[in-house]
Image: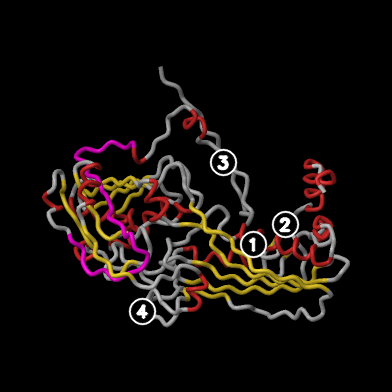
Amino acid sequence: MSETIPARGIPGRSSTSILGNKVLRREDAALLRGRGEYVANEQFDDLLHVHFVRSSVAHGEIKSVEVGDTRVMPGVVAVYTAQDLGLDDRPPPNDDYATEAKRPFLARDRVRFVGEPVAVVVAETAYQAADAAEAIWVDVEPLPVVATVSDAVAADTVLFSERADNVIWEIPAKNVIDFSTCEAVATAELWNSRVAAVSIEPRVAAASYEDGRLTCWASSQGAHDHRDEVASCLGMEPSDVRTIVKDIGGGFGAKGMVSEEEIIVGQLARLLGRPIRWVESRTENLTGYVHGRAQAQTVTIGGSHDGRVTHYRLEVVQDSGAYPKWGAYLAEFTRNLATGVYDIANVEFSSVSVATNTAPICAYRGAGRPEATAAVERAMDLFASEIGMDPTEVRRRNFVPPEAFPYTTPTGTSMDSGDYRGSLDRALAAADYAGLR
């Protein structure tokens, strides 16, 4: 007996809010009944499996990659390093980034973060590929490590020798504000910690090449972007690449970017003429995949003793990781929502995105916007402490009032509606704030 599970439609939207729109879910029925379709469950004839050899050193020169007898180990079909993979270095995803910060698909002369792929083994089974990968020896001469954004700004060591610094991208301040008229000023240095996306399903990629056409199966948040990026990196026409995305076990923004490993899987299918699949381990996911957040923030907030905030400065140093992905651009989204839900007349924002010897940064749940909220809310607490006022009262006195909508922030973001005082009051009542104080 078969059962038809109706799909609920998604209502059309004439516009998209920066805060998101309500979308009716239509996939839940199948998932709750165990009928999800994932890349790891796809069935292929004559399938080959992939295992990556990764750097255990954060920064160093590659002296040699010793393959030895790996190619004749049981089940091994092929072993590739950067020299024989046949792919050009991948340019940064944004034309405004430092053009020197290109990434090889497999590390060629230098490794720049722990977890960076150096070689790839293809075998008949996943276990055979993993066993063979253990036999490959990567000789690396360690270099000084740029571990923090402070190290990156100091630039005593640079990640890309063609550059004199580690700067990937900058947003200069459009206006410099003067705090001398403020009755009270508070400042602090904050760190919005690096996090890992850790979706239940890690990265999974499969590919098959036949008659000049490449079919990719991806756990991706964007099928069309995936197709276009694979085609671009492999020198193919988009019309000759098909990307299939079925169900994905979480993405959180991280799977919005097409990783180097996914493109390598497509290249291997093309080189070997057999279907290829790679399933990322959790260790690989934590070290070799993109992370999120990672902002150093300096907040300065000023105003009057009656609780009115009139000045706010936010300076950001964005950790971009070893190779710039969309994470270097996160500070732009932080700028957009710098003042949060508050009506502040004088605002200054600046940022610099820098390269470090860490996993690359990408989008993660809000992508730069939660970082803005964390900064301005901490600043409000600091200001309240400075003037000796209850932090909830400081917020009440600085909310954008309902009658001000539609409202455009000093950084140019349009806001259509909001009753922030009412929301705060309901939250305080539910928490018994008076009792907690």
The amino acid type, in three-letter code, at marker 3 is Ile
Name which residue lies at 55% across and 52% down.
365
In this picture, which residue range is highlighted in magenta?
Answer: 41-66
Mark 2 and mark 3: span between their CA atoms? 22 Å
Q: Which of marks 3 and 1 precedes in the sequence? A: 3
Task: Indicate which label's residue lies in the foreground, 4 or 2.
Answer: 4
Name which residue lies at 25% across and 38% down.
44
Task: Identify residue for label 4.
Answer: 161
Task: Indicate which label's residue lies in the foreground, 1 or 4.
Answer: 4
Task: Indicate which label's residue lies in the foreground, 3 or 4.
Answer: 4
The residue nearer to you, when weighing 394 against 61, is 61
The amino acid type, in three-letter code, at marker 1 is Ala
Q: Which mark is residue 372?
A: 1
Image position of 353 (left or right of 143)? right
Q: Which of marks 4 and 3 precedes in the sequence? A: 3
Task: Identify residue for label 2.
Answer: 416
Mark 2: few, some, or many residues within 10 Å (few <14, many ≥20)?
few
- SS under mark 3: loop
The residue nearer to you, when weighing 37 against 165, is 165
Image position of 265 (left or right of 310)? left
